[in-house]
Image: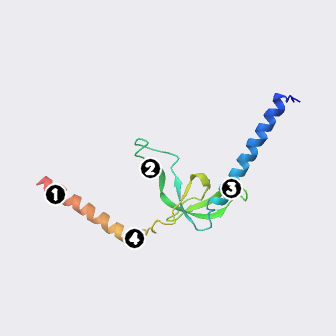
């Protein structure tokens, strides 16, 4: 016999089916993707693009950040701090983070070397100005 189903109940069945599939795919993806641990190094996506066309601009911030802790149990939200120097800690979602443990460690330039460089630059400018005056 032919059974008629109301459009409302048919819509509910479709919604439940897609919800179940989405939930299953999400859980599968979460188990496959690497969960970040404390002290993992990551790059943060550049959300404030400045200058240049889309092809040429940088998609990732220059500073490398370190994972401090995982904020949520169910969702992948992490607290980060800059690897070098001082800076504020940030709480960001996994979608805008890129693991970069393979990048070499950066060494911060020593302040004495920076001062010497500035002194030599100003001395070079002064000598250049003196030569142009003569």
Nearer-N-terminus badge (4/1): 4
Report if the CB atoms under discs 3 and 2 are less than 8 Å apart.
no
Residue at point 65% right, 55% down?
29
Residue at point 76% right, 38% down?
15
Residue annotated with mark 2:
58
Percent from the top left, x then y, of residue 103?
A: 46, 65
Q: Which class describes the residues within 10 Å of circle 2: few (<14), some (14-19), or many (20+)?
A: some
Residue annotated with mark 3:
28
Relative depth, front residue between 133 and 121: 121
Circle 4 sits in a helix, a strand or a loop, which is it?
loop
For marks 3 and 1, give the CA distance.
71 Å
Residue 116, image quadrant: bottom left
Residue annotated with mark 1:
130
For marks 3 and 2, give the CA distance.
31 Å
Relative depth, front residue between 74 and 18: 18
Report if the CB atoms under discs 4 and 1 are less than 8 Å apart.
no
Left or right of 110? Residue 4 is: right
Residue at point 67% right, 60% down?
31
């Amino acid at each position: 016999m032919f059974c008629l189903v109301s459009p409302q109940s048919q819509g509910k069945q479709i919604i439940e089916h897609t919800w179940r599939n989405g939930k299953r795919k999400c859980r599968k993806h979460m188990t496959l993707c690497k969960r970040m641990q404390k002290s993992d190094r990551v790059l943060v996506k550049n959300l404030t693009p400045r200058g240049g066309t889309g092809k040429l601009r940088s998609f990732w911030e220059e500073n490398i950040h370190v994972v401090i802790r995982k904020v949520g149990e169910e969702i992948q939200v992490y607290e980060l701090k800059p690897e070098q120097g001082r800076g504020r800690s940030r709480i960001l979602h996994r979608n805008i983070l890129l693991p970069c443990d393979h990048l070499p460690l950066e060494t911060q330039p020593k302040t004495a070397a920076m001062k010497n460089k500035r002194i030599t630059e100003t001395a070079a400018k002064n000598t250049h100005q003196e030569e142009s005056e003569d």
